[in-house]
Amino acid sequence: MYHTRRSLMRYLKNAWYVAALSSEVGPEDLFHRKLLGTNVLLYRKQNGDPVAMRDRCPHRFAPLHLGKRDGDQIVCHYHALKFDCTGQCTHNPHGSGNIPKAAKVPTYPLQEKYGFIWIWMGDEPADPTQLPDYSPLDNGPPTGIGYTHMHMNANYQLMIDNVMDLSHIDHVHGDAISTRGQLSPIIPEVKETERSVFARWEWKQTPPIFVLSHFLPDPQAEARHFFTVEWMPPANIQLSVGGAQGDTPFEQGIGAYDLHTCTPETEDSTHYFFATRRNHLEDDADFNAMKLKAMRDAFELEDGPIIQGVQEEMNGEEFFDLDPVLMSNDIASVKVRRNLLKLLEIEDSKTPQAETAKA
Amino acid sequence: MYHTRRSLMRYLKNAWYVAALSSEVGPEDLFHRKLLGTNVLLYRKQNGDPVAMRDRCPHRFAPLHLGKRDGDQIVCHYHALKFDCTGQCTHNPHGSGNIPKAAKVPTYPLQEKYGFIWIWMGDEPADPTQLPDYSPLDNGPPTGIGYTHMHMNANYQLMIDNVMDLSHIDHVHGDAISTRGQLSPIIPEVKETERSVFARWEWKQTPPIFVLSHFLPDPQAEARHFFTVEWMPPANIQLSVGGAQGDTPFEQGIGAYDLHTCTPETEDSTHYFFATRRNHLEDDADFNAMKLKAMRDAFELEDGPIIQGVQEEMNGEEFFDLDPVLMSNDIASVKVRRNLLKLLEIEDSKTPQAETAKA
Amino acid sequence: MYHTRRSLMRYLKNAWYVAALSSEVGPEDLFHRKLLGTNVLLYRKQNGDPVAMRDRCPHRFAPLHLGKRDGDQIVCHYHALKFDCTGQCTHNPHGSGNIPKAAKVPTYPLQEKYGFIWIWMGDEPADPTQLPDYSPLDNGPPTGIGYTHMHMNANYQLMIDNVMDLSHIDHVHGDAISTRGQLSPIIPEVKETERSVFARWEWKQTPPIFVLSHFLPDPQAEARHFFTVEWMPPANIQLSVGGAQGDTPFEQGIGAYDLHTCTPETEDSTHYFFATRRNHLEDDADFNAMKLKAMRDAFELEDGPIIQGVQEEMNGEEFFDLDPVLMSNDIASVKVRRNLLKLLEIEDSKTPQAETAKA
C-alpha cells in the first residue's frame, strides 16, 4: 500500500519537461514557475539563450526572481549576491568580498526547441537524445501554429488519460469536433514500444468533423477520418487528426498535428502545455487565434471540470488501487500508466536509499 | 489517546441521516452533496421517487452529477456509461459495448418522510424501523411548517450539545425567545433509554415568551411554559415548546414542534436541517416565512459564531479529552455524547479489522 | 532530524513577549489575539490595568471574547459563566449555582511598559526582571515616538535575522536610508553575552543618510554614522541609528532609537511590533505619522515579500539543516540563532517528558 502510494506521488525526474513556452520568457524577464515541486527561475542571456536555476539564493533562501538582472547575471534582492548563469556566485558585497565555495545555485540543463523551453531536473546527466522529435511543429508559418499554457488542479496522469483515450470527445466536447458517435465503438489499433504507446482510430462520417469540413472538397459529403495519439515519457502526446474525401490519401488531406505535454507542478497540480499546427488556412492569423482559443476553452471549460472532479474523487489515491472498471477504450491510457510505473520503478531503484528517505 | 481520537472522528454509519430536504431535489435535478465524507448524487425517478448513489463513475471516477438524465437513468459526462437507478451499468458505447461485471455504482437506501429524504449509508441492511416517528411534522397545512438547510463549519456533536442544553437561550439569543432568566436555574427532568435522551424544563414567566405571547389569551399575564428535547440516534432532536395560561392544559396551549437533525459532511463540518411546525396562525404563509427566517438567523448568526469558535478552540480533539468543566445544565447533552460513544463502539466492534484499517 | 525539526517548531515559553500595543486594548475592548499558538483574551480592568486569559471558557470551550464585560469580570456568551480577572468563575446561573472547582480560566502575567503590554505564557513563575530596560522609548513627547503592529506570514526568527543583519538595507530598501554601499563592506563589531547579541557598524558617507540629513548642520556634507542592534531573548532588538558632522559626538548628533519585537502567532506566522523614537522634530505630529508610515511600508512592502518568500522556500525546515552559505554579514544573526537554540534546549530539558509528548 505504502509503496504504491509513493509511486503515485512521484514523477520521473530524469526526463525533459516543458518549463515554459518560448514566448513566456521575454528578454528582460525573471520568470519563475514551480516545476516538479521546486521553484525555478528562468531568464534569457543577452544572446537569447535561456537559463534555468533554482529560484532560491543559497545564502538565506530568498527567491531569486525578486532580484534583478546584471547582464547575464542575477543579483539577489536580499543581500546582493551575484550569480552567473552557471549558478556560480561571482560577487559578494559584504565584508572582504570573499566568495564561499558553496555559494552556488543549482542550474538545470535546457533545450529550446519546437517553441518550448525544455528542462531536465534529474540528477543523472541530461540526455539530449531523450527529447523526441516534434519537428512537425516547426514546418509552416507562425500563423499556422498556436501555443498555450494552462494550469490544472489535477495530477498530470489524469491529463494523459484524457488525451490517450479520445473516446470521450463525443461526450465531453461540443459539435465542433463531434464524430457523431462513430469513434466510441472503434477499438483503436494500439502499439507499444519500450518508450512509447501509440493508438489509431480510423472511420468514416457524414458530414465530416466540423472543424475540418469547410476545408474539404465537399463539406456535406462523407469523409474518411483518423486520429492518432502517441505518448512518450514523461508526459508528451503527439496527436494527429485528419480528414480526406474520395481517393485523396490522408497525406494530402486536411488535418492538424498537436503536442500535448504536461509538467507536474506538484503531485496535485499540473502545467498543461499545448501546441497545434494545421495544414490549412496557415496564413490567417485571426483564424489561428480563434482556433487556439476554442481549443483552450474546450480543455479548460469542458475537460477541466471533469478532470478536476476526478482528482477530488480520487483524493490522492493511486489509480489502480481504486479498482477502476476498465474497458476497451482504456487500452492505450492504461498501457501508458503501466509503462510510466515501470519507468518510475527503474528510476527509483537507481536512487540511493538515503536519498529516497530524505525526499 | 489514539483510540479516543478515532472515536471522535467517526459517525454512525448504520443509521438514517437526512440527505436533503424533499424540496431541494427537483424533478429534473442532479443534486449532489457530501454526506459522511462521501459525495452522493440525488435525483428523482419520473414517478418522483428519490434515488441516491455514489457521485462517482466506477470507470474513471468522474462525478456523476456532471452528467445528464436519460429517463430514470444517469449518463456519465466523461465516457457516456449509463446507469440505472439500482446503480447497474446498462449501456457502454465503447468497443463491442460489453458491460463489465464490476460496472456498478453503490446506491443507498432512502426513505422520503416528514419533508426530508433520509439516507442509509452503512454496510448493514437498512432498517426502516430505525427512523423514528416524526409525524407531528405532517399534521397541519404547509403554511404551518418551515424547513431549512444550513451549513456549519463544526462537528455535528457540537450542534447536538447546543440543542440538548437549552440553558443557553437566555444568553445567546435575543428577546424573542427569552425566558427572562427562568430557564437556567432549572435542573431539567432527564430520562434516558437505550436509544434516546429526553429532557424537560417547566416554568412560569411574566410576560410569556415573546414568540408565543401574542397568541395567548393575555400577552402580558403570567404563563406556564415548557421545553422538551428528545435526542435519538444518530443526530435527531425533537424539540417542543409550549405556553398556556390559567387552567388551560399545555395540550390546548400555544406551541411548536421542531425537528433539528444533523448530517456530518466531514468530521469538521455539518449539514444542519431544521423543520418547525406551529399550532397557531397556521394558514399565514407570510408569518410562516418570517418565523422561519428569524429562527434560521438565530442559528446562523447567534449560535453559529459560538459553535464554530468552539470547533476552532477544540482543534479536532475529543470533547472529554479536553476535560470540560461540566455542570447541571450539561446532563442531557453529556448523556447523548456517552450514548453515541457506546453506539460507535458497538458499530466499531462489528467492523472487520481490515475494514477499519482501510478507513 | 526529528529533534532538530522540533527545535525549529518551538519558541521560548518562559519569556516576555509583546501581546499588544498599549493603544490596541481600549478601556471597553475584549481584544483577542493568537500568541504562541494559543488564543488569548486581553482587556482592561476599570482602573486601566490589563488582564490576559486564555480565550476559551473551561465549560464548553466557547471563545470568551464573544462575551461581555461586567465590571472587571467577563461573562461567557454561551452559558453566562462569569469569571473574574484571576480567571476564577464567580457566577454560574445554572441549576443550584454551584461553581465547580475546575471552573477556572488560565491567566497570564502581564507588564505594561514602554507602550506595550508584555505577556508571560510559560509555566515557570514570571520573572519581571527578565524584561529588559527599553526606557529610551519613554524619554520624550508622544509626538516623537511611533508604534505599529504588523502581521507576517513567516517564522519569527526570519524577522530577527533581517534586523540583526543590516547589510541588507542598501539592497532591499530605497534611497531614504541608503548608505550608498558603505555598510556592506563593514564587518560589524559583534559582542555576545549569555543573553544578548550586539553589533555595531560605523562609517562615513556624503551626503548623509537621507532621513537624517536635513536635521544635520550641512545636509550635503560628509557625516559620521553608526547603527547598533542588540538582541535579547526571546525576540527583542533595540536598534539605534545616528549621524553627526564635524566634531559633534554621536551623543549630541541626530538619531533614532527603535525597538523591533516579535511574537510568534504560530510556527509560521508572527506578530511584528515596532516602536521608533527620534531626537529631532519631536513635537511634529504630522512628521511623526509620516515617518512611521514610511517605516511600516518599508517592512511590509520591501522586507515583507522577501521574508515571506524565504519562509515558503524553507518549507518548514530548520535553518541550519538547509546548509545556508554563511558570510561575514551573518555573524550577529547566526549568533542569535545559536543562542536561541541553546535557550530552547535549556527550557526543553526542564520540561517533563510527558509534557513534551503531549505538546
Image: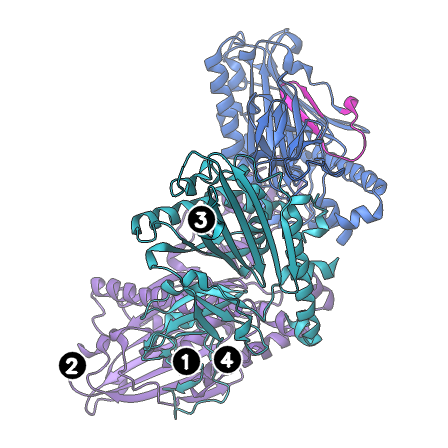
Chain colours: A cyan, B blue, C purple
Q: Which numbered mark, 4 or 1, is in the foreground of this view?
A: 1
At a point 22% along the width and 77% down the height, the residue shown is C210
**Residue C219 marker:** 2
Identity of the amino acid at label 2? Pro
Vertical comparison of A356 with C196: above or below: above
Residue type, label 3? Gly
Spot occupied by residue C73 in the image (x, y as percentages of width and height) = 51, 46
Amino acid on which the number 1 mark rests in the picture? Cys
Q: Position of residue A58 (x, y in %)?
A: 48, 79
Q: Which residue is mark 3?
A: A253
Which of label 3 and label 1 is nearer to you? 3
Q: Quadrant of the N terminus of chain A?
A: bottom right
Q: Which mark is residue A85?
A: 1
Marks 3 and 1, the one that precedes in the sequence: 1
Mark 4 highlights which residue? C336
Taking C293 as reference, is B185 above or below it?
Answer: above
- Helix or strand or loop: what does disc 3 sit on? loop
Left or right of C28? Residue B248 is: right
Camera sees residue C332 = yes
